Image (cartoon, rainbow, N blue to C red):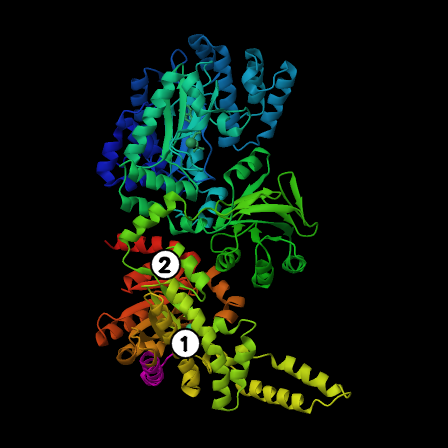
Amino acid sequence: MTKWVYTFDEVSEAEALVGDWDSVRGLLGGKGANLADMTRLGVPVPPGFTVTTEACNAYTDAGLTVPEGMWDQVRSALDHVEEKTGKKFGDPKNPLLVSCRSGAKFSMPGMMDTVLDIGLNHEVAAELAEISGDAHFAYDSYRRLIQMFGSVVLGNPDEPYEEILEEFRAKTGVATDAELPTDALKDIVERFLEITPRFPSDPDEQLKLAVEAVFKSWSGKRAVDYRNASNIAHDLGTAVNVQTMVFGNLGEDCLTGVAMSRHGATGENHIEGDYLFNAQGEDVVAGIRATIPVGQMATDMPKAFEELQAISDQLELHYRDMQDMEFTVENGKLWLLQTRDGKRTAQAAVRIAVELVEEGKISKEEAVMRVTPDQIDFFLHPQFSIESRKEAKAAGNLLAEGLNVSPGAAVGMVAFDADTAVDWAEAGKKVMLVRPETKPDDVHGMLAAEGIVTSRGGRTSHAALVARQFGKPAVVGIAELDIDLEGRTMSVGDRVVAEGDFVSIEGTSGEVFVGQLPTVIPDINDRWLSTLLGWADEFRRLRVLANADYPVDAKRALEYGAEGIGLCRTEHMFFEAERLPTVQRMILADTTEEREEALDILMPMQRGDFRGLFEAMSGMPVIIRMIDPPLHEFLPAQGDLEHELHDLEKDTAASHDAEIKEIERKIGRVEGLHEENPMLGFRGVRLGILMPEIPKMQARAIIEAACDAKENGFDPKPEIMIPVSIHVKEIERVKGFIVEVANEVMAARGIEVEYQVGTMVETPRAALTAGPLAREAEFFSFGTNDLTQTTFAISRDDAEKSFLIKYVEDGILPVNPFQTLDRLGVGGLIKIAVEGGRAQRPGMEIGICGEHGGDPESVALCHEFGLDYVSCSPFRVPVARLAAAHAAINDA
Ligand code: ADP
Ligand code: MG
Ligand code: MG
């Protein structure tokens, strides 16, 4: 016979049956498992039992029929509870009251609300009034039961109940329900029963209906939607906890409250929370009465507080993490009603992890694993300050909460379509794009906006994917947000926001506020964060380098913990306003001499840039890539030149023959350089093969800069990287130019510089012929942006505008391969190349540059493929450091 029911005393049996704690949580739900576990620890928990998630699944599978034997087991468990409490369920003389609480493996909104005070009816209430000597308490509990049962179990609307309460508050002249006199409560009970004709007076019937209602809520629309949106499996089921009631509403030495063992927002190590005297259940969170900060309990009820503090410490030690607890004090006696690992902000997560290590409670490794790369990302985006969020909430300005799909805070004026967003952004306004959902047509608006809000869609919706892609904060899937595109307003309940009004969103938490909240940038040098990242560095095997083109970027990268430069794109230096004309002259030159003249001007400029990099990164590798993009990217648009020509020809006042000739020549060159597929065209190493003067100039600038740096007492480690190679002969040729120049420079300067020449691997052919390439190339760096494009034969710029996001939304591709490395395809090529390269040149340095270097999942793959380093944008360096540590720890 399947065991459908476990009393809180049977947790060891459950554990023996299913094996590990995670499975116990699967069977009993998080709430039930921890209630039983606390019971085992000797923490005061009101006796009770748990109906398993398996029973819920059996119920669902059998078309809403309770599995055989379940009610009998419930009855036996109830016997056990009656024995422990000395009370009897349904016995008016000595009544046991219980609560019925849902609890899945993961805490989940959308599940059925708790029903308290089950077991009351007219007779029991009357006796309870006698026994407790507190009629007010008895009828207060009774009216709560009818209302909760009516709305939660029977699905009645709440308003009629609230209206009756309101009527009686007015009639008796009191402000809160707690102050209603006993007679009024009795009348309320009668009125409630009138509008709840299906309320069963039989306690057994009450319990059965409540348990079944919890089972049903698992398959209810709200719960299903939530699981879909957050990728929770539908076959987990929910458990039901039935637990002896303890009463926080039994007079003035009673209270009910919630507490965290540490501060959930800042991570400070002191108990934090709120309570209310003479209250029950949800009163504390419902915000009907002003709550009291938990610290005040030290004065109000010192014994109970001391015990709460001790239990809080005990539970933290046991669960080895910050705890979020629910408790009640009945006539001075403390009871724990729930504990779970507490939710926390990224800041608090980091601080708590570090302090738990410092207190000797967890290991450094665990601390590193407790913080997610996404949480590190938090430190790199603007945020709303804790105070401003608190104030906004207190002022009632929290409009709604949705899915937190793209981190960071953003403030903007609501725009309901992409074109409006673009228009306003161009007029210098800050815009928040709000749509029911987004489509490819909306992308221009999404880019123009500070942040994105949608009422529909989940974590893999178009809006979520695009927002993450472009680093825009976003909150999606806000079910209660009504968007009226015609009326140009949106609303939640009766709160209306018009187009043009300001809203503030917090993409890390999923909150949407009305109005403008001030933003702050969290401190990356925060003591706790640097400690944690320092520990991460102890564990990771991958080195983390940065993509940096200028000395300022190099300095920032160093601050963030980079160990060198993995990619310096030299062409960025060419685009600077004062250099571009010379670059254009160089490209448009008809003869080698003319080209060399222009290059002679550019050389010292590049040399200066490189020296800055070498000096900033003394002792660390600086990988410099030779010019890569198609040359036409540097040239003026043909249309512009034609306009210029036209204007000159129209001007008859003076003769422009020479100028016209020059422009005609330029147009000819631009036409000549035009390509149908520039991405697959005249670029990368191909430029250097046809125009050797360019790599020679760049090699000279690099080696001279290294000599300069060395003379200044620095330790330059230049690595020269050849892009887009497809054949070893290309490398052989260009390496020849480089070595020739380097030898010449070093001889002239009388300085030896150690340098390497390697190549990027960014075409399938390069990967497949890595062995031969490695005969010449001394190192490899996977340019995974291009390697992904060439492997998929997909142009990123075009694909993301048209079909790619749809592919991911529909699950044809699991992720956007430009964001997260494609394990099988691109990853397969990487594996082949690593093997081929190292077979030819044992121990050669291999890494990746490209945006994947800052993506946690891709970093884990790089670890798996045995790369030496990842290189990413300076801002992503801390994220990559932690991700690399996670990969190494998971590996070990
Ligand atoms: P949720 O999952 O929404 O937090 P709970 O099942 O934890 O719902 O119940 C909400 C609140 O109801 C608890 O915090 C507690 O205050 C109260 N409650 C639940 N069961 C009992 C009980 N047996 N005795 C007293 N209060 C209870
Ligand atoms: Mg709870
Ligand atoms: Mg490339």
Q: Verify whether residue 506 appears in magenta.
A: no
Viewer-side label of 2, 1: 1
Residue projecting furthest to the right? 653
Hey, what amino acid is under mark 2? Ala
The label on residue 701 is 1
Q: Is residue 50 above or below residue 877?
A: above
Where ligand 1 lies, by quadrant?
top left
Q: Dot 1, how many residues are within 10 Å of its Cα: few (below 14), some (14-19), or many (20+)?
A: many
- In the rendered structure, find residue 562 and report the number of the disc placed on it: 2
| Image x and y of residue 131, in percent | 42, 9
Q: Residues within 10 Å of mark 2 (few under 14, many from 20)?
A: many
Can residue 780 be spotted in the picture? yes
Assign the magenta stretch its main secondary structure.
Answer: helix
- Disc 1 residue type? Ala
Residue 881 image-quadrant placement: bottom left
The magenta-colored residue range is 724-747
Question: Residue 778 in the image: x percent, y percent?
Answer: 28, 75
In which image quadrant can residue 553 be found? bottom left
Q: Is residue 176 above or below residue 375?
A: above
Residue at the image point whose x is 54% and y is 81% from the top: 584
Q: Nearer the viewer, residue 29 or 726?
A: 726
